[in-house]
Image (cartoon, rainbow, N blue to C red):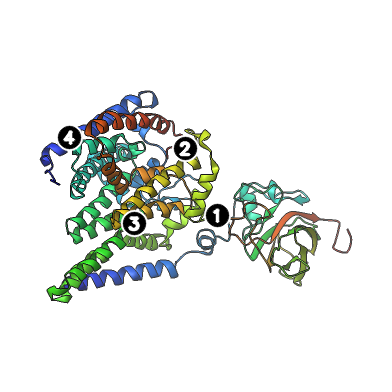
């Protein structure tokens, strides 16, 4: 099969930027009655990220008598960048966060186009752009949330491994682990690559040099999380504060199988779209696990592991937010698109993407109203 | 060689950080109880919670701040299904309550309900009650049944009388909620009666 080259980087960058801006214009038009784009897009965790970014981890949360403690649930890389940009351009935290997220989204679209080409998918990258932007729940890529940055870094890690750049992969994994707790899931992938590289190059000699080349990315991969743990230990005395404060979000450890069973038995679709529903959340989780299974079937072990673990880890303590975790997972996006790309381009472009975009609209409006089904 | 040394240095430093975080947190007792050991659902503050002046105190009727002031360790402020309808269920083997005493209170009666699915026959929950300045009391509360325990107030007791209750055979609280609740529950504190005019010899 031929593997046609991608359009020029400039054309791709321009296309991705224009499409992201067009989506923002659409979002803004729909936000007209909801206080404008920036106000309407800032819901739930947005307030946490902007406060941590602009006022720091020790700022008062005004949540019961808990002081600043719950702030530590929010990993530092995104709020650090948000605070830095807000200070640099003199904008509010919400504006700075939206600028950042949408820049990262453009980066994700470009990295995804390259990754898909490496994966053997020859469909137009502009269809890929349209798929990501139209898929319901990907509104989080444009919100003051970590989804775009995390997806960019984790896809960057996987892409770097495909391109045989393990040091870059290790750095991406380190940054991802400073962005979200799931970033640590990239560490075993980088480690497995290192072992594999050691094995296949076993005849090359100079074992110490090869061991160093394999070990450094592995040692780098969890660095973001470890630095965050060190900072928490230094400041609060509790290095695992980010985990301990999860009790405030009422997450309860029952294991993923039990939670998915509960979700399947709940059959509470009628609560959509105002409230989170176990049925809806479980449907997304199962869709994601199905795609992970397909990745495993296709012997794409790293993708299968990352997607499955990214779903099963949060599902062990609850079903909240699973639609977001699945829909914004870069492996879910590239794997689903690589399936859809088997359709004729016209069907994908003129039927599938419009249907997805239409399904996105009620979710966006529910988000603007801070309805729970979306978060 | 340089990369290998750097990798080893990073790995050692990260292992040390994780080791400190896991095994040597530098936190106070309150933080440990609330965030790490989960022995309390209360984030304690001494100045919070109005002390009730009634003869009968029912945990289910207390606001959260007062609940936390009176039942600081080992009692569930909220059940997985919400606040308990009557009393408060224990959530660990060792529990502590702080009973506000009024001038003249001579005895405290605690109405307890037992929960001991794993206790040997005759099925009952064994508890050991300790009050500073008084002999410890060992008693049994029938499984799924209520029992009233009378405690004499020791002379010279302070305004807040600390009472610790050790529970011998806690089990999973399927009696009160869903069977997935992982806590070790053994006792429900249904209500507390304080008496100015009674002691433990009479009714």
Q: How many marks?
A: 4
Residue with the mark numbered 2: A372
Left or right relative to A282: residue B41: right
Q: Share a chain, discs 2 and 3?
A: yes
Left or right relative to A166: residue A51: right
For the residues bearing labels 2 and 3, Cβ distance under 8 angstroms: no
Could you give the CA–CA distance between mark 4 and mark 1, rounded to whole angstroms? 52 Å
Upstream in sequence: badge 4 or badge 3? 4
Q: Residues within 10 Å of mark 2 (few under 14, many from 20)?
A: some
Q: Nearer the viewer, mark 4 or mark 3?
A: 3
Q: Nearer the viewer, mark 4 or mark 1?
A: 4
Residue with the mark numbered 3: A305
Could you give the CA–CA distance between mark 4 and mark 3, rounded to whole angstroms? 32 Å
Could you give the CA–CA distance between mark 2 and mark 1, rounded to whole angstroms? 27 Å
Point 34% across, 56% down: residue: A305
Of the numbered discs in the image, which one, if any, rests on residue A15?
A: 4
Upstream in sequence: badge 4 or badge 2? 4
Q: Share a chain, discs 4 and 1?
A: no
Q: Nearer the viewer, mark 1 or mark 3?
A: 3
Of the numbered discs in the image, which one, if any, rests on residue B43?
A: 1
């Amino acid at each position: 099969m031929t593997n046609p080259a991608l359009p020029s980087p400039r054309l791709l960058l321009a296309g991705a930027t224009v499409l992201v801006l067009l989506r923002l214009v659409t979002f803004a038009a729909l936000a007209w009655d909801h206080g404008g784009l920036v106000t309407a897009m800032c819901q739930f965790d947005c307030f946490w990220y902007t406060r941590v970014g602009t006022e720091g981890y020790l700022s008062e949360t005004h949540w019961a008598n808990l002081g600043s403690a719950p702030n530590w649930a929010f990993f530092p890389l995104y709020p650090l960048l948000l605070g830095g940009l807000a200070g640099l351009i003199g904008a509010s935290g919400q504006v700075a966060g939206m600028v950042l997220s949408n820049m990262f989204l453009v980066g994700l679209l470009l990295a995804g186009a390259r990754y898909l080409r490496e994966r053997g998918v020859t469909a137009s990258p502009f269809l890929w752009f349209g798929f990501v932007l139209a898929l319901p729940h990907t509104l989080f890529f444009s919100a003051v949330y970590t989804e775009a940055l995390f997806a960019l870094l984790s896809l960057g890690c996987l892409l770097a491994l495909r391109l045989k750049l393990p040091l870059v992969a290790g750095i991406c994994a380190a940054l991802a682990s400073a962005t979200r707790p799931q970033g640590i899931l990239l560490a075993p992938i980088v480690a497995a690559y290192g072992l594999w590289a050691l094995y296949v190059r076993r005849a090359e000699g100079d074992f110490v040099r090869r061991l160093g080349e394999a070990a450094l990315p592995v040692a780098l991969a969890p660095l973001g999380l470890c630095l965050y743990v060190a900072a928490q230990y230094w400041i609060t005395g509790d290095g695992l504060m980010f985990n301990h404060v999860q009790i405030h979000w009422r997450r309860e450890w029952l294991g993923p199988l039990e939670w998915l069973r509960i979700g399947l038995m709940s059959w509470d679709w009628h609560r959509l779209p105002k409230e989170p529903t176990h049925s809806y959340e479980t449907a997304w989780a199962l869709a994601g696990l199905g795609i992970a299974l397909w990745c495993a079937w296709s012997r794409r072990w790293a993708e299968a592991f990352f997607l499955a673990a990214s779903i099963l880890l949060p599902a062990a303590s609850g079903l909240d937010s699973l639609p977001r975790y699945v829909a914004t997972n870069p492996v879910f996006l590239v794997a689903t698109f690589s399936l859809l790309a088997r359709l004729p381009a016209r069907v994908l472009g003129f039927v599938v993407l419009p249907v997805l975009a239409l399904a996105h609209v009620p979710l966006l409006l529910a988000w603007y109203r801070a309805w729970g089904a979306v978060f | 060689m340089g990369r290998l040394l750097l990798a080893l240095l990073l790995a050692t430093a990260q292992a040390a950080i994780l080791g400190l975080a896991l095994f040597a947190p530098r936190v106070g007792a309150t933080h440990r109880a609330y965030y790490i050991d989960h022995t309390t659902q209360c984030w304690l503050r001494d100045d919070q919670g109005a002390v009730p002046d009634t003869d009968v105190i029912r945990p289910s009727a207390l606001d959260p701040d007062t609940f936390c002031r009176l039942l600081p360790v080992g009692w569930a402020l909220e059940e997985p299904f919400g606040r308990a309808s009557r009393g408060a269920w224990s959530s660990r083997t060792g529990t502590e309550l702080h009973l506000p005493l009024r001038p003249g209170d001579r005895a405290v009666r605690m109405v307890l309900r037992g929960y001991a699915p794993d206790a040997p026959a005759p099925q009952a929950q064994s508890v050991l009650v300790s009050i500073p300045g008084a002999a410890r009391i060992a008693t049994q509360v029938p499984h799924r049944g209520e029992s009233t325990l009378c405690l004499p107030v020791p002379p010279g007791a302070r305004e807040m009388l600390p009472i610790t209750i050790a529970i011998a055979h806690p089990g999973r609280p399927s009696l009160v909620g869903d069977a997935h609740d992982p806590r070790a529950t053994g006792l429900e504190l249904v209500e507390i009666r304080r008496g100015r005019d009674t002691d433990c010899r009479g009714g």
